[in-house]
Image: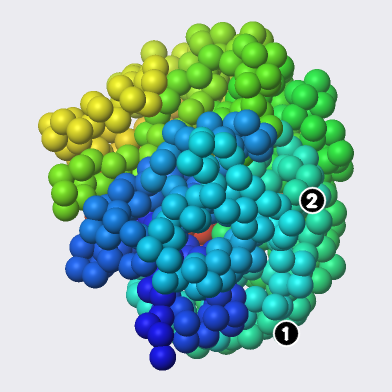
Amino acid sequence: MMKPIRIFLADLTYNTVTLSTDAFPLNVGFVASFAKKEFGEQVEIELFKYIDELEAAINSNPPDILGCSNYCWNERIGLEMFRLVVEKNPNAICISGGPNFPLELNEQKKFLKKRPEIDIYVPIDGEIGFSNFIKFVIENKNNEKLKSLLHNQKIDGCLTINSEGDLLYSIASLRTSSLDDIPSPYSMGLMDKFFDDKLAPMIQTNRGCPFSCTFCTDGTDMVRKVNQFSIDRVREDVEYIGKHVTPSVHTLHISDLNFGMYPRDLETCSEIAKLIDKQNYPSYINTATGKNQQEKIIAAIKKLSGSLRLRMSVQSMDENVLKNIKRSNISVEKMLGLAPAIKNAGLNTETEIILGLPGDTYDAHVKSLRNLVHAGVDHVESYTCMLLPGAEMSLPQERKKWGYQTKFRILPRDFVKLKNGKNVLEIEEVIVASNTLSFDEYKEARQLALIIFVNKIGIVYEPIIKFFTENGYSIFDVFLLMLKNKNSSNIKIVKIFERFLDATLGELWDNPEELEQNYQDDKEYEKLISGEDGYNVIQFYFTQILLTSMNEWTEYFIECCNKILKELLSNDAKSRVFNQICDYCRGLSHNVLGENRMSTNPTYEFNFDIEDWLKKSNQKIEEYLLSQPVKYQFKFSDIQFNQLEDNLKIFGNSSIGWTSVVKNTQINYLWRKPQPITPILSNKQ
């Protein structure tokens, strides 16, 4: 019997200071399971997630074929692994695949010529193209010039550069239409090694996206059709995960691009709900919820006991911007109009907005933010626009049309020192100005983004925001005032804003070559290790506020509220009500991440049933007057404490580690819960 072809397949994550991405490598798992089905004992496949494990395996016994997934967060480490494997085995073939790849043939040619480490590229779905490649290798296994032959041969679903420097490609079969033809990597045992107390399981129920967003790598015609796995297949994977997941892992990833938008998704939710009922897992589901059909998504979320948040990704609310990014077919108004109903159902909502999209202006961006805040969305997150090679927005003609001014920065936590001494880091290109947005406006918008991020994350300031709405005031005016007065606030808050702006500017570089070269210096690289450089600036400073300054932030927020409400609060009755609401928020936000947080439990007295009032959308707080005052103590439950501690074991007790802990913790688990220590006697019937 012929010796099997040894294949390493990797979907790499960085874990130098903390895990960068904690999802199982399901993508290469699918590629492996399909290849095993097709070729059986002719192939020997090993999967990798961790860089050090792959590096060690290559050094000790390099494979015949190395395949690496190509996303914006692991492209450079993949190229470095290709260089390493060829050093150890010059005949090794390097194959790459994933969405981080240009759309136009001429740009694809430039991409591959600039990356000679890649022998073969498989775009879109990887299973068929990879198997066609393996078939060719098996048929020509004894050819001494296999690698050269490969570069001069068209293979369905693959691209390569031939010896003349031309692009060779055949796109007869890019996608897998019948997804159940791909065996489950779980049931084949390929995922077992990744149940390691650190990584979180991932499932996929469908592939494809019906939308055409120009900033997204999934906005192309090639992936327009949505294909589905059967519900039986999904059920089997969920049940398998339930039997193998460890108690310290609380997250489940769903890789669908529009989860909840399709009727069949409710069946998936039912299967996950059974798992939640059985073993309280997952407590947090990370997925992209659908962009239309929000009623269906609400039904899906209700089934999942609050572990899934409705992510209403509007990106902009400006009609011109939406038209420019081909997103006008997504009903933003209808999406946001459902926010009150979602809130009444006891569910949380979040939305994303992108700064710097084509035609975006500072005023349009701020207006979009104001509208989102007024729509009652729980959490509003603003991103800097990233230019991805596989997105329409990054095409040369689009860059010229909109006058993009771009900079380069390190992707948060994505860096490593290899055994050979090479420092590798991932770099992204971002838009910081255009022909409609100045760089100064970009800086101002980023500071406003931090304010909104902190003030609109979870339930912490919901009572104050509700009071503003009831009395006809705009909470967004408070956010703008916090931006305007930031330099005259508490010294801790002044320092937070100063360091945040310094970090926002300091992370930007003019070109990727200078950035990469800078961190080859070990003294500079040490700044990445220590957390001085290379992190998500907004997430990091939100976490720093939680760790060091949350009480001061709350007081600054209340101070600005008082200035906006000055006329209203001249009424003593209104002032007393508002003061009690502020005390409630002080209780929720007190010492949320301190080591002694379980023992520092503040107590406040209230004349109103604020908890009950928060559950109602159209009744004023004055209607919730209590027969006698009640005292509440604000505490963390053991469940809240343990989830944070479990995540801390995974991500590490460092500034960067805490940032990942916060990001991967159910939002409302961050805040204290009010516990009555005297009976509640309400006048309300």
Provide the secondary structure element on which disc 1 rests.
helix
| In the image, farthest residue toward the left | 523
Query: Residue 166 is drawn in which quadrant?
Result: top right
Give the residue displayed 75% in from the left and 62% down from the top: 260
Up/down of 43 relative to 204, above or below: below
x and y percentages locating residue 95 in the rendered image: 47, 56
- Label of residue 224 in the image: 2
Q: If the image is split into quadrants, where does the C terminus sit?
A: bottom right
Camera-nearest residue between 613 and 352 = 352
Against 424, residue 24 (above or below) is: below
Residue 333 pos. (x, y %): 85, 37
Residue at x 57%, y 59% (from the top left corner): 286
Q: Amino acid at mark 2?
A: Arg
Q: Is residue 473 visible?
A: no
Residue closest to the eye, 438 or 155: 155
Nearer the observer: mark 1 or 2; the answer is 2
Look at the numbered disc 2 and give the secondary structure of its residue. Answer: loop
Q: Residue at x 33, y 67 (%)?
A: 63
Relative to 15, residue 194 above or below: below
- For marks 1 and 2, give the CA distance: 24 Å
Circle 1 residues within 10 Å: few <14, some 14–19, many ≥20? few
Identify the mark nearer the N-term, 1 or 2: 2
204 and 185: which is toward the camera: 185
Tag 1 residue: 232
289 with respect to 514 (left or right): right
What amino acid is labelled 1 in the image?
Answer: Asp
The spot of residue 354 in percent (x, y) is: 62, 30
Q: Quadrant of residue 353?
A: top right
